[in-house]
Image: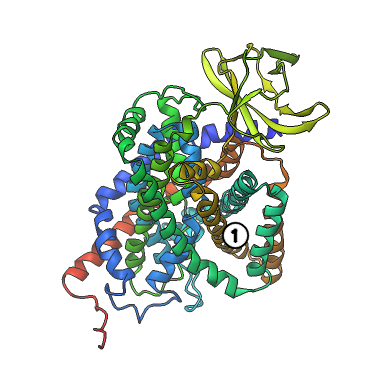
Amino acid sequence: MDAFFALLGRINEVMLSVPVLASLLGAGVLFTLWSGFSQYRSLTHGVALVAGRGIDTSRGAGALTHFQALSAALSGTVGLGNVAGVAIAVEFGGPGAVFWMWVVGIVGMALKSTEVTLSLIYRDLSDPEDPHGGAMYVCRRGLAAKGPVWGALGKLAGALFCLSMLAFAVTGGNMFQAWNVADTTQAYFGVPPWASGLTLAVLAAAVLLGGVKRLGATADKLVPLMCLLYLIGGVYVLTINAHALPDVFRLIFRCAFAPAEAMGAFTGASLGMAFIFGMKRALFSSEAGLGTAPMAHAAVKTPEPVTEGVVAGLEPFVDTIVLCTITALVILCSGVWSRGPAGTWPVPPSMTQIEPGQWEPATRELPTQSSETFRPGDPVFVMLEIDGERARQYGTVTLQETGIGIEWQRHYGVSTPVMVEPGVFLDYRGSTLAAKAFDSGHAGLGKWMVTAAIWLFALATIITYGYYGEQGVRYFGGGNRAVMVYRVIWCAIVAATCLGFIRTSKEIDTLSTVAMGFMLAINLPVMLLLGTRAMGAWHDYFRRLKRGEIARPAPRSR
């Protein structure tokens, strides 16, 4: 598996490199200016539309209200990306990653408005009560309007986007969710990961296979409540740690433009690492520019495509500017991200070369001086220094012939690594790191509230991305039988993810984001090519709205 994850890492280095992410940032700035700061429209007119006070939508095609479409899209975007994704960004990108998450959240509002407007313009209305849309339809229909050659390219682009979207649905919308749920549940309650994975798969199957709509409806109602409780819990922890907030904000801005120094469990991060992890985790969380959320928005009932683009701009604000910020500040204020070792040796063990270029610590015994109780199955790591840079070497606490010890993953490299911290760190992976940060504010807050939240978030996201994947299957001409086969495979993947082949936060980060670069490489150029169409419709709508040419909703009777 090491070679497999190394290959995925090299793909990510190209597809989600600094130039690629900078182009996303540039496109967001372009559409911000071109739309006349659409963020303002989303926060004002968008809120009115969601509340039913915008325009009269009774004459439009579609099945969902603006509020229902926004809720459906948010059920996909509000998930483990807001918890585990943020934790991974801070863990590997440092405090500066939070700044770049904010940047993506702000410009992402303009990107999301643009791509959803295009999706509504080019959606398939062959069945007015059940419209279909998304980036694949924009590729096929939008580019076809430019001529036969563009039409052929559009069909190819639509098919390639669908394949990339299906891959992202599996890795990001399914495996990332299941793995984090299983890891946090094991960390707090000792439940074997396979048991959590199987439970989550059965719950997802009850909705996707068994048609238990009540469970899905219940999850939809509980997720907003869980979001509210999560926010309240986060604000509570931040209130307790209010004295640390000024230093945390200074750290965020300083590390956004300068390297972050290593300390404790934090390996340090360059400016490039802060930029990459902040950008890609915010991109994963908000989906701005990826082309996935337009599939949920395409079902909205409206005579004006721009209205749903305006509403969609609220998603990155809620998802990234609000929820992700709460998680990031709680983690940074708690100090858990740069914690000390859970146990120390009197003398750090030397590193032994097992085979040429393969290293591990010379001892498998746990430290005698421990502040934590180690249990079999606990993930751990030690801190190494290699050629002047810090790196982690991971292991797992296991039952051995001599008692409880550590089974090490080997470090591969030519240079001799040196252990720079005299102890073993407990590896708080993804959502577990966020939960431990909440525990620092009040004992049990992370154990109970965050664990409950991630189960609900994960289930809602798995169901939503299951729907997204179905749209891809149907786009390729798959009928009901093909969709049913897809659903069975989808639920099986939920359970299979928790069988132990993904071992670290770095591996789940690499796996969950590998398809994003391909989606971005297709969707972003298409948005730019059709930007004139989207922005023309945008400005025309607001001109007509200002002149009173668009019907307003009838006053409600009292």
Where the N terminus falls, by quadrant? Answer: top right
Q: Quadrant of residue 544?
A: bottom left
Q: Who is closer to the viewer here, 429 or 312? A: 429
Q: Who is closer to the viewer here, 549 or 242? A: 242
Residue topped by disc 1: 469
Quick check: 214 left or right of 352? left
Give percent across and percent down for residue 512. Answer: 57, 44
Q: Residue furthest right?
A: 401
> Going 30% across and 45% down the picture, which residue do you hit?
30
* Mark 1, secondary structure of its residue: helix
In the figure, 56 relative to 170: above or below? Answer: below
Give percent across and percent down for residue 208. Answer: 64, 67
Where the C terminus falls, by quadrant? Answer: bottom left
Quick check: 225 left or right of 195? left
Residue 528 seen: no
Give percent across and percent down for residue 229. Answer: 43, 58
Q: Who is closer to the viewer here, 33 or 412? A: 412
> Going 40% across and 54% down the picture, which residue do you hit?
231
Quick check: 531 left or right of 355? left
Q: Amino acid at mark 1?
A: Gly
Q: Who is closer to the viewer here, 451 or 417? A: 451
Give percent across and percent down for residue 21. Answer: 42, 38
Residue 550 seen: yes
